[in-house]
Image (spheres, rainbow, N blue to C red):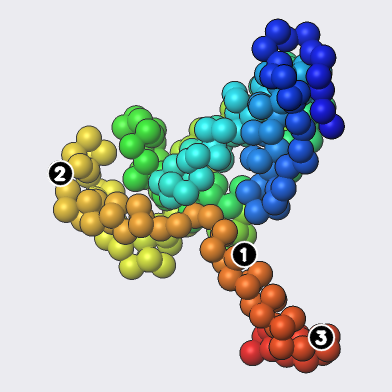
């Protein structure tokens, strides 16, 4: 579609082209958000306005911090709180986004919330509360990979609310030191165990893009070998 007449006075002579965004499934829907931002400068609708506000005020920050393991628990909670507050802007969009992301709370589980111990943006006061919360008895069985949360209580939650004695399993599973937890958070930066554990945690990848690409490559390779569905499945699970 080419627009040659527009309310803006800076339309180029050749007009403005709008093209459908591609590969949205490979970059969540950030490509669509970028497209809305570009389009918003030339053409205005209420729908575009809400998409742009959502992308700029909420989604972009989380998008860029996604690969940072230590920020994962805080980002999950921050995102939920901001989605809840987005009700004041667009209640429908807020509700749909919350419903979607409430099913993706991998890093607020009893074990993975331990990543926040190494997050420089978590205050010392919060880290101290997290240490105290380690005395709170957890379940005798391994908690599910992701938690469930009531939307009405999102704004009341703090990062330490997700910590229990089960959180210590994080250190046992990875085989990293946890003795620094016996000290005050203000001295952790000087503790060798803490620094060693932090280096390991910072090297972790918290996104599944690599795994998804690997699966896609295997599937494409299988199609080159045979088109028979039964044989295709046998190759995939080989």
Q: Nearer the viewer, mark 1 or mark 3?
A: 3
Q: Residues within 10 Å of mark 2 (few under 14, many from 20)?
A: few
Residue 16 horizontal side relative to residue 188, left or right:
right
Report the front residue among 213 and 202. 213
Q: Residues within 10 Å of mark 3 (few under 14, many from 20)?
A: few
Pick whichever of labels 3 and 2 is earlier in the sequence: 2
Residue 230 horizontal side relative to residue 190, left or right:
right
Report the front residue among 189 and 3. 3
Q: Secondary structure at mark 2?
A: helix
User: Residue at point 43% right, 50% down?
Assistant: 69
Residue 199 horizontal side relative to residue 54, left or right:
left
Q: Nearer the viewer, mark 2 or mark 1?
A: 1
Is residue 133 visible to the viewer in this orientation of the structure? no
**Measured from the top left, where is residue 178 in percent x and y?**
29, 56
Q: Quadrant of residue 183?
A: top left
Kindly identify which numbered label has been placed on residue 200. none
User: Residue at point 22% right, 51% down?
Assistant: 195
On the image, numbered disc 2 is attached to which residue? Answer: 190
Report the front residue among 56 and 45. 45
User: Residue at point 35% right, 57% down?
Assistant: 203
Q: Secondary structure at mark 3?
A: loop
**Measured from the top left, where is residue 113 in percent x and y?**
47, 48
On the image, numbered disc 3 is attached to which residue? Answer: 227
- The quarter in which the C terminus is drawn is bottom right
Q: Secondary structure at mark 1?
A: helix
Vertical comparison of 175 with 193: above or below = below
In whole angstroms, how far apart are the C-alphas of marks 3 and 2? Answer: 59 Å
On the image, numbered disc 1 is attached to which residue? Answer: 212
- The quarter in which the N terminus is drawn is top right
**Measured from the top left, where is residue 201 in percent x and y?**
36, 55
Vertical comparison of 142 with 44: above or below = below
């Amino acid at each position: 579609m080419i627009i040659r007449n527009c309310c803006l006075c800076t339309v180029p002579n050749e007009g403005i082209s709008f093209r459908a965004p591609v590969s949205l499934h490979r970059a969540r829907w950030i490509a669509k958000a970028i497209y809305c931002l570009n389009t918003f400068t030339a053409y205005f609708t209420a729908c575009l306005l809400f998409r742009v506000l959502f992308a700029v005020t909420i989604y972009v920050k989380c998008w860029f911090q996604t690969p940072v393991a230590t920020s994962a628990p805080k980002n999950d909670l921050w995102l939920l709180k901001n989605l809840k507050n987005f009700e004041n802007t667009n209640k429908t969009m807020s509700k749909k986004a919350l419903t979607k992301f409430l099913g993706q709370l991998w890093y607020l589980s009893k074990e993975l919330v331990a990543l926040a111990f190494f997050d420089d943006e978590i205050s010392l006061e919060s880290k101290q509360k997290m240490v105290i919360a380690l005395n709170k008895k957890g379940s005798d069985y391994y908690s599910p990979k992701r938690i469930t949360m009531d939307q009405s209580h999102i704004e009341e939650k703090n990062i330490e609310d997700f910590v229990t004695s089960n959180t210590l399993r994080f250190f046992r599973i990875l085989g990293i030191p946890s003795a620094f937890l016996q000290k005050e958070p203000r001295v952790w930066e000087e503790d060798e165990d803490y620094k060693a554990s932090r280096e390991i945690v910072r090297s972790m990848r918290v996104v599944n893009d690599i795994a998804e690409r690997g699966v896609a490559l295997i599937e494409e390779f299988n199609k080159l070998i045979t088109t028979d569905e039964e044989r295709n499945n046998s190759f995939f699970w080989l």
